[in-house]
Image (spheres, rainbow, N blue to C red):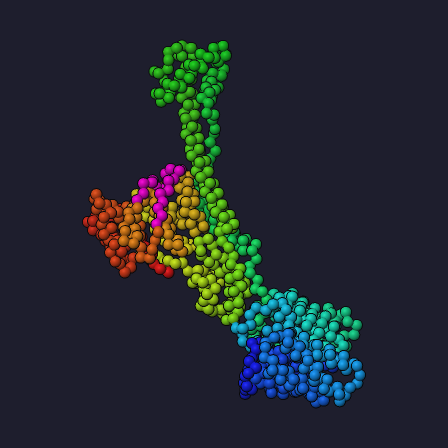
């Protein structure tokens, strides 16, 4: 059993150990396996898979097998064959499977030829001997390629289809060695054939189960005339059991019995078939009672034998798109809730032409007047000019009355007072409509901005699908191989690398899998450290560790005599190694400012966590706040985005206070000249790029801090603090807050907020 790695021929004979028991039993059974009165399997098994350093045990095992099958008279033939082969490998030390296969067949030929001199019965004996020699040579190759007999678990890598067929034939030969052994009416060959078929059907694919059923059916019955029939019985039973393996043990048992029953229906005389109900029942019962740990081992074997199916590319793509779109939907749900209170109404529309005022006024006043025809038909040009003059007076003075109406108009119009009243009213309606249309234009522009930002979002997703990540197929195979050597079963695997350099590996593992061991294997294969992130829907997720981490501290203090700080602050990580720190400062202080800043922060955080770019998220946020016409909302935004893989950062400042950065030995003050979000539809993004190194410190502040003790050197005191060594960011944030309070004589004149961050190696 230890011969898959060839044992050196120079090794002396040794004392047997407990591990030699199973190979010796397998040799006995292989020697018992009979085909048309021949016993070619014992020599082939000894030559291919038995440890030659205990050849004397192998000789005894083979003799036992031959004696219990064909009697003592058959022993000399196979004894000679074994000795000839053993002498051959002592002389020919080269590891060549073809030569050794021929030697195996030749040994049987020599052993049989030696006995032909004592008992030759005709040409048929020569034919059988040649056939037996050929079978022995071929079975040497089969046994060599059957990795089921490998004792070293770590050496049994993934098996090819050819190797699996060899393993199935080996199992069939071993079971065939049980022929003639019974316990009362129970035939062990039938019992273990049923058991082997069910085990394979439960823990492997449909193709492997069917192949195993055919091999076992033929080989276990090859000593009789019904081998072909039994191939059909076990083969169809295995296929039915494989169809039902999703229902686990009970499903396999029902499927096997159903398949066997279907086959037996087509056999004219089922009493000629060596498969009894008792044997089938016992084999099925053994299968049902097999402990889970045994099934786990077989599942491990078959998982390594098969190609582990990766998640199909179309399924991967669908899951990725569904995830991104669902998160985007959640973000827009937040946007919907923000606008829930804003009502929509239909406004009556007027034409831009001033003629609408003339037409509406004439319709209200002049209709039915006895002079209407003379004014609006005979003398239309003069009337039109006079009315335009009245509109000019309204625009100049704000309204029309008896004092500013030209005297010639009063002399011509018999309904002067009525006309003055109606034209004032109609003009006011016109002016209001113009204002409404201007608001509508602004609103349409804001919505257009949102559509534009959404276009950027979906283009970004399309870019991700096109070339934003790639599947690491070669690495997936290596991960499966390495996990298999540790006895860890990966049922499903998907490894992805993004353009940022981050990697994600998804594995469906047994519940008892050791996470530390899995992390080590993936890290070794990907050549970068990975960590277990969590499990969702049975898939364990492992992500590559970023090169950097961020130590953060947040400290806030409300304005004097207020219980609520109007600033809203958050720090969080998203996928792809992005770290965000955001301060939103609502206009004013107290609960109203808190409402504005909290709404701003909630929407912005939702967009960023959904995968929006910072520019897209800020654009949609600004248009959302501008559209909230029922309650004007303004807020500054100070946003820091750090790429933890590259060590780069982007700082976006929209109406916010200064940010202080200790970059190496240099202290930089970053300020903003833009106005807060929610005021203008066209927002100007003031962004700065920063290259960060380990140990760099960033202070994000609100104006309650930066304007403390305002002097010409406004932030000089912060410069002096940030260059000091601090063991933690909590200490830095506290000193900044305490110093700001001291400069204000211990009075918080405004809401005060500090985020202190330090870049650290991962």
Q: Is residue 627 above or below residue 30?
A: above
Q: Is residue 546 above or below residue 459?
A: below
188 displayed left or right of 523? right
82 displayed left or right of 710? right
Residue at 62% across, 70% down: 163
Task: Decide whether residue 689 is among the magenta residues.
Answer: yes
Please name whichever residue, 42 or 710, is drawn nearer the observer in this view of the structure. Answer: 42
551 displayed left or right of 496? left
Residue at 53% across, 54% down: 319
Residue at 52% across, 71% down: 485
> x, y (%) of residue 518?
47, 67
Give the main secondary structure, helix, strand or loop, of the magenta stretch: loop
> x, y (%) of residue 179?
69, 81
Please name whichever residue, 67 or 714, is drawn nearer the observer in this view of the structure. Answer: 67
* Quadrant for the N terminus in the image: bottom right
Residue found at the very far left of the displayed protein: 745
> x, y (%) of residue 289?
60, 76
Q: Is residue 440 above or below residue 160?
A: above
Residue 161: tell me if it is visible.
Answer: yes
Number of numbered discs overlaid on the protein picture: 0
Residue at 24% across, 48% down: 748
Task: Decide whether residue 216 is among the magenta residues.
Answer: no
> x, y (%) of residue 379?
47, 10
* Quadrant for the C terminus in the image: bottom left
Please name whichever residue, 148 or 681, is drawn nearer the observer in this view of the structure. Answer: 148
543 displayed left or right of 213? left
The magenta segment is: 671-690
Residue 175: tell me if it is visible.
Answer: no
Q: Is residue 255 above or below residue 743?
A: below
Please name whichever residue, 189 or 258, is drawn nearer the observer in this view of the structure. Answer: 189
């Amino acid at each position: 059993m230890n011969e898959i790695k060839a044992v050196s021929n120079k090794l002396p004979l040794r004392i047997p150990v407990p591990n030699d028991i199973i190979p010796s039993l397998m040799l006995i059974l292989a020697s018992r396996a009979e085909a048309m009165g021949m016993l070619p399997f014992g020599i082939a098994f000894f030559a291919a898979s038995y440890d030659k350093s205990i050849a004397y045990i192998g000789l005894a095992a083979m003799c036992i097998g031959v004696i219990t099958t064909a009697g003592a008279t058959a022993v000399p033939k196979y004894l000679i064959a074994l000795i000839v082969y053993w002498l051959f490998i002592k002389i020919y030390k080269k590891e060549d499977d073809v030569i050794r296969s021929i030697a195996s067949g030749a040994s049987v030929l020599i052993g049989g030829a030696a006995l032909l001199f004592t008992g030759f019965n005709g040409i048929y004996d020569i034919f059988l001997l040649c056939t037996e020699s050929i079978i022995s040579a071929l079975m040497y190759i089969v046994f060599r390629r059957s990795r089921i007999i490998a004792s070293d678990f770590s050496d049994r890598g993934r098996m090819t289809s050819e190797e699996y067929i060899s393993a199935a034939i080996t199992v069939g030969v071993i079971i065939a060695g049980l022929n003639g052994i019974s316990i009362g009416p129970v035939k062990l060959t039938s019992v273990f054939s049923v058991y082997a078929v069910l085990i394979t059907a439960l823990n492997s694919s449909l193709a492997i189960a069917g192949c195993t059923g055919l091999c076992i059916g033929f080989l276990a019955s090859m000593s009789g005339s019904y081998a072909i029939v039994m191939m059909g019985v076990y083969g169809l039973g295995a296929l039915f059991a494989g169809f039902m393996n999703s229902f686990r043990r009970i499903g396999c048992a029902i499927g096997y019995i159903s398949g066997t029953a279907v086959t037996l229906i087509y056999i004219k005389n089922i009493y000629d078939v060596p498969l009894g109900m008792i044997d089938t029942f016992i084999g099925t019962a053994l299968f049902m009672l097999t402990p889970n740990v045994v099934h786990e081992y077989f599942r491990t074997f078959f998982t390594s034998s098969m190609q582990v199916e990766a998640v199909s590319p179309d399924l991967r793509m669908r899951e990725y798109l569904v995830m991104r779109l669902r998160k985007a939907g959640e973000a827009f749900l937040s946007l919907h809730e923000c606008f829930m209170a804003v009502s929509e109404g239909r406004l009556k529309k007027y034409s831009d032409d001033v003629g609408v005022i003339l037409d509406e006024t004439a319709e209200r006043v002049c209709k039915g007047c006895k002079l209407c025809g003379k004014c609006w038909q005979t003398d239309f040009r003069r009337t039109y000019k006079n009315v335009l003059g009245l509109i000019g007076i309204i625009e100049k003075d704000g309204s029309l009355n008896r004092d500013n109406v030209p005297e010639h108009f009063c002399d011509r119009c018999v309904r002067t007072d009525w006309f003055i009243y109606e034209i004032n009213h109609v003009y006011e309606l016109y002016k209001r409509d113009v204002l409404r249309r201007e608001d509508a234009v602004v609103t349409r522009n804001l919505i257009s901005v949102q559509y534009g930002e959404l276009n950027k979002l979906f283009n970004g997703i399309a870019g991700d699908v096109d070339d934003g990540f790639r599947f690491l197929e070669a690495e997936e195979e290596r991960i499966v191989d390495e996990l298999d050597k540790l006895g860890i079963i990966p049922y499903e695997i998907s490894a992805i690398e993004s353009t940022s350099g981050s990697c994600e590996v998804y594995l469906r593992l047994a519940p008892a899998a050791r996470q530390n061991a899995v992390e080590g294997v993936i890290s070794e294969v990907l050549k970068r450290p990975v960590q277990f992130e969590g499990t969702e829907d049975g898939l364990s997720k492992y992500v590559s560790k970023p090169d950097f981490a961020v130590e953060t501290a947040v400290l806030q203090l409300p304005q004097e005599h207020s219980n609520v700080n109007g600033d809203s602050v958050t720090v969080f990580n998203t996928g792809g190694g992005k770290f965000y720190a955001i301060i939103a400062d609502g206009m004013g202080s107290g609960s109203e400012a808190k409402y504005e800043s909290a709404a701003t922060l909630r929407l912005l955080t939702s967009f960023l966590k959904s995968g929006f770019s910072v520019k897209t998220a800020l654009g949609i946020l600004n248009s959302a706040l501008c559209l909230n016409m029922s309650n004007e909302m303004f807020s500054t935004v100070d946003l820091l985005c750090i790429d933890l893989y590259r060590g780069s950062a982007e700082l976006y400042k929209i109406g916010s206070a200064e940010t202080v950065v200790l970059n190496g030995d240099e202290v930089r003050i970053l300020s903003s000249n833009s106005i807060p979000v929610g005021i203008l539809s066209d927002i100007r993004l003031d962004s700065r790029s920063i290259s960060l190194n380990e140990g760099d410190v960033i202070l994000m502040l609100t104006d309650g801090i930066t304007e403390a003790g305002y002097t010409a050197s406004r932030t000089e005191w912060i410069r002096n603090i940030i260059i000091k060594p601090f063991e933690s960011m909590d200490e830095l944030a506290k000193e900044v807050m305490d110093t700001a309070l001291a400069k204000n004589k211990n009075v918080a004149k405004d809401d005060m907020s500090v985020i202190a961050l330090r870049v650290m190696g991962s």
